[in-house]
C-alpha cells in the first residue's frame, strides 16, 4: 500500500511539467500560493477562480491583511504532497519559506515564482508588477501601484526629523537597510536603530533603548485580551517612562510584515504621530 502511494505521488510529479507546459503561453488558471506575502498579492490581484489554495496564515486577521479575501479559499501548510495533489500551473513562493517543497517542485520543472524581500518602496512596486504580470493581470498591478503612490502622496511627512525607535515584541526593532527602515524615512523620520546597538538577531537591549533619546516610540498594536510574554519588555517601568516622555504610536504588525499597498498605512500613521502636538519638539 505504501509503495503504491509513493508511485502515485511520483506519477503526479512526472505529469506536472507537461500539463504546465501546455498552458504556459496563457495566464495561469491553477495558482497556489505558499507564502503569506504571496497570499496577500495573489488574493488582491488574481481572479478568484484562478486561486487553488493559499497558506493557512492568510485567514488569520492578526497577521494577514487579506483575511476576508481568504475566507472560503482552500489552505495548505506548504507540504509537497499538498501542492502536488492540486496540480498547479503556477506556484508562488517566498525566497526563505517552504524550501524543501520549492526544491522538490523545481526538480520536476514545475513553474515556481519565488518572491524576494524588497528593501525599499521601488522594490514593493516592482514586486506588485511582477506578481500581477505572472497572474496575467498586469493592468491590476499598475492600478495597485497607482493607488499606493496616491496614498503615499497624500501623506504629510514629519515637519521635523524626529527620532523614531521601533520596539516590537521580544525587543526586535527595524534594522537599517530594509523596507521597514525605508518606510520610517518616507514618513520623514530618523530610524534610531541605525545608531544604537543590536544583537545579531536584531534585538535592542533595554539599556540601549533607554539611552537612545527617541522622540517617537513605535510599538505593535496588540490584539485586545491576548497578552503575551513577548510583550513583557514593553511593560517594563523603564519603557513606560520612555513612553511617557515621548510619544508612542501603535501600528499593527500585519502592516509591516509584507510588501504591498498596506505599507502606505505605516507611513501615514508614522507621519501623523510625528505631526501631532506633543511634549517634545
Image: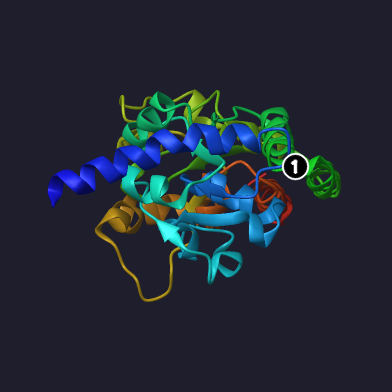
- Picture colour scheme: rainbow
Residue 208: where, in percent of width, then height?
36, 33
Q: Give the residue displayed 15% in from the left and 44% down from the top.
A: 3
Instruction: Name the side, left or right, on which 190 lies relative to 200.
Output: right
Label 1, secondary structure: give it: loop
Q: How many residues crowd mark 1 within 10 Å: few (<14), some (14–19), many (20+)?
A: some
Q: Nearer the viewer, residue 68 or 196?
A: 68
Residue extending furthest toward the bottom: 225
Q: How many circles with numbers are drawn on the protein?
A: 1
On the image, the x and y values in percent for residue 197 come to: 37, 25
The structure residue drawn at horizontal position 31% and vertical position 33%, both measured from the top left corner, is 100
Give the residue number, with chain letter if any, for mark 1.
136
Front in this rendered view, residue 130 or 89? 89
Q: Nearer the viewer, residue 161 or 179?
A: 179
Q: Is residue 204 above or below residue 56?
A: above
Name the residue at 55% across, 51% down: 39
Residue 196 image position (x, y, % from top left): 43, 26
Residue 153 is drawn in which quadrant? top right
Examine the rendering and report whether any part of residue 188 can be seen: no
Q: Position of residue 9 (x, y in %)?
A: 30, 43
* Residue 72 at least partly seen: yes
> Quadrant of the image for the C terminus?
top right
Determine whether, in the image, residue 128 is placed left or right of residue 106.
Answer: right
Q: Is residue 36 above or below residue 214?
A: below
Which residue is drawn at the image coordinates 60% and 29% (left, top)? 118
Left or right: 108, with 184 as reference point: left
Q: In the rendered view, would you say 19 is above or below 195?
A: below
Amino acid at each position: 500500500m505504501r509503495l503504491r502511494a509513493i508511485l502515485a505521488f511520483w506519477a503526479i510529479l512526472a505529469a506536472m511539467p507537461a500539463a504546465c507546459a501546455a498552458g504556459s503561453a496563457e495566464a495561469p488558471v491553477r495558482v497556489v500560493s505558499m507564502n503569506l506575502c504571496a497570499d496577500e498579492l495573489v488574493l488582491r490581484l488574481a481572479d478568484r477562480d484562478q486561486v487553488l489554495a493559499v497558506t493557512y496564515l492568510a485567514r488569520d486577521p492578526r497577521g494577514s491583511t487579506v483575511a476576508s479575501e481568504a475566507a472560503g479559499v482552500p489552505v495548505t501548510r506548504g507540504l509537497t504532497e499538498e501542492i502536488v495533489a492540486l496540480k498547479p500551473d503556477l506556484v508562488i513562493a517566498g525566497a526563505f519559506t517552504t524550501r524543501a517543497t520549492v526544491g522538490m517542485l523545481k526538480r520536476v520543472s514545475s513553474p515556481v515564482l519565488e518572491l524576494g524581500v524588497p528593501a525599499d518602496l521601488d522594490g514593493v512596486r516592482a514586486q506588485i508588477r511582477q506578481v500581477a504580470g505572472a497572474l496575467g493581470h498586469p493592468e491590476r498591478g499598475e492600478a495597485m501601484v497607482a493607488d499606493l503612490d496616491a496614498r503615499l502622496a497624500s501623506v504629510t511627512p514629519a515637519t521635523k526629523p524626529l527620532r523614531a525607535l521601533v520596539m516590537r515584541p521580544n525587543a526586535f526593532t527595524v534594522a537599517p537597510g530594509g523596507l521597514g527602515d525605508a518606510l520610517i524615512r518616507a514618513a520623514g523620520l530618523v530610524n534610531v536603530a541605525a545608531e544604537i546597538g543590536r544583537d545579531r538577531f536584531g534585538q535592542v537591549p533595554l539599556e540601549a533603548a533607554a539611552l537612545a533619546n527617541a522622540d517617537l516610540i513605535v510599538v505593535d498594536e496588540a490584539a485586545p485580551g491576548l497578552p503575551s510574554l513577548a510583550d513583557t519588555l514593553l511593560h517594563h517601568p523603564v519603557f513606560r517612562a520612555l513612553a511617557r516622555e515621548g510619544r508612542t504610536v501603535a501600528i499593527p504588525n500585519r502592516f509591516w510584515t509584507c510588501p504591498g499597498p498596506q505599507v502606505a498605512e505605516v507611513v501615514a500613521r508614522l507621519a501623523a504621530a510625528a505631526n501631532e502636538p506633543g511634549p517634545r519638539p
